[in-house]
Amino acid sequence: MSSNVAIKEGDITAPTPQNTPLTHAPIAGGLSRPTVPDISEDNEDEEISAADMLGLVHGRLANLIGKSSGYIESLPVEVKRNIEALKGVQVKQNELQNQYKRECLELEKKYSELQKPLYERRFAIVTGAAQPTPEEIEAGEAASQKENHDYVPLPKDAPESKSGIPEFWLTALRNHIGLSEIITDRDAEALKFLTDIRCSYLPTTDPKPGYKLTFHFTSNEYFENEVLEKTYLYQEEVGYSGDFVYDRAIGTEIKWKEDKDLTKEFEIKKQRNKNTNRTRLVRKARPTDSFFNFFSPPVPPAEGALENGDIEEEELFDLEQKLEIDYQIGEDIKEKVIPKAVDYFTGHALEYEDMDDDDEDLDDDDDDDESGEERFEEDSESDEDVPVAKRRGPPRGRGGAGAANTNPEECKQQ
């Protein structure tokens, strides 16, 4: 048998949504590759390479996705009735999935209420309003000993602290990898007055589910608010994937004191009057990076804004990037920083984040050399050469901590 194989374009069956998967074959993801012998040079004019064949198939498929191949329309009417019946069955499935997510959210609310006394106790110790009990210290030392066998217990006659734990929340926030990147030195001076962060769920009576992050401050020189809030809303119905879908966020308007707005930078510019030729100094403000921009979240674009020409594709891409980052910051504060605040204060939580990063590195190492070279070339392109991503819709939310990975059986066990 010849070591060469001839693949003619006429022998390729045209791809349709019925006989071709919507996703690219594993070869596109740098996974296993089929063994295809080389095509002989003698038949180059008449034959098509395997790579060209796959490109042809993918190209045809790209033109067919979202379009009917005519297969469904060609079915007998009695079969079409069955298809419509299956859609009706799926409607019931969707209703049950929506109910399940709602009940999981109610379960989260229940345990959130049970944790309130513990958060109150944490607040009292952090602010110095109360002293820790010997039992609390003993339990904490036992946990430290379990995590680190070289841990040395504190002396039994250690003095009490009247100031609690200074800069507890500032340190915890700065020890979160993502949040540390948006906290400036100027922000840090204001965040020293942060005494507590809480999360609460919106009432069941509200039209949309969601949660609220509440930041408590003592009196300070930067703003008049004692409480800054950020509310995240989900859409009323779960999305196609079965999870709650992020809708939008609403933040508190910060009442900045004079010349203390950390979200702006001020500069002095000279202005010349064209008629009198006199100059004057003008003080102008311009937006700047700040953690406190978190309370002025980006506004999602209106439905169909791109199609209507209300926004450019590149602007839409940038806006969606900001929405995704804003949503992720809220989720991290809710699911990580608030429940594990002491671990972020001590830096212990970073060990687990490093483990997650290592897992991602291992995934990257599984790719072969060719795919790695392609990624390197893509990363080295300038911003102008990178194609604008298509609209994927707003970032997908979850019905609470870990809801995306929750199943009904786990809910039952709880």
Image (cartoon, rainbow, N blue to C red):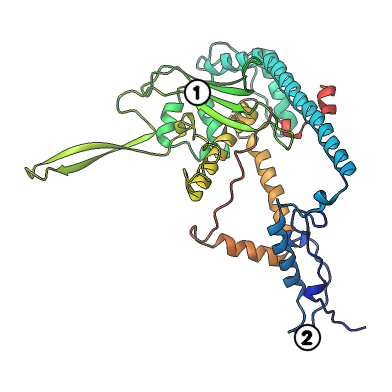
Q: Residue placed farthest to the bottom in the image?
A: 42
Query: In the figure, 387 relative to 403: above or below?
Result: below
Disc number placed over residue 43 in the picture, else none: 2
What residue sits 53% from the left and 31% below the top? 171
Q: Where is residue 99 in the image (x, y as percent from the top left)?
A: 76, 23
What residue sits 85% from the left and 35% below the top? 85
Q: Residue placed farthest to the right in the image?
A: 1
Alpha-carbon span between mark 2 and mark 1: 78 Å
Residue under pointer 1: 166
**Amino acid at the residue labelled 2:** Asn
Q: Is mark 2 on a helix, strand or loop?
A: helix
Q: Mark 2 or 1, which is nearer the eye?
A: 2
Q: Where is residue 373 in the image (x, y as percent from the top left)?
A: 64, 66
What residue sits 52% from the left and 38% below the top? 301
Mark 1 neighbour class, 10 Å CA radius: few under 14, some 14 to 19, many 20 or more: some
Query: In the figure, 30 relative to 319: above or below?
Result: below
Please say whether residue 50 is visible from this viewpoint: yes
Please say whether residue 407 is visible from this viewpoint: no
**Amino acid at the residue labelled 1:** Pro
What residue sits 78% from the left and 64% below the top? 14
Query: Residue 393, located in which quarter of the rendered image?
Result: top right
Image quadrant occupied by the N terminus: bottom right
Query: Residue 80, located in which quarter of the rendered image?
Result: top right
Mark 2 neighbour class, 10 Å CA radius: few under 14, some 14 to 19, many 20 or more: few
Q: Where is residue 379 in the image (x, y as percent from the top left)?
A: 57, 60
Q: Nearer the viewer, residue 304 or 278?
A: 304
Image quadrant occupied by the C terminus: top right
Query: In the figure, 115 relative to 345: above or below?
Result: above
Q: Is mark 1 on a helix, strand or loop?
A: loop
Q: Nearer the viewer, residue 276 or 12?
A: 12
Q: Position of residue 35 (x, y in %)?
A: 84, 71
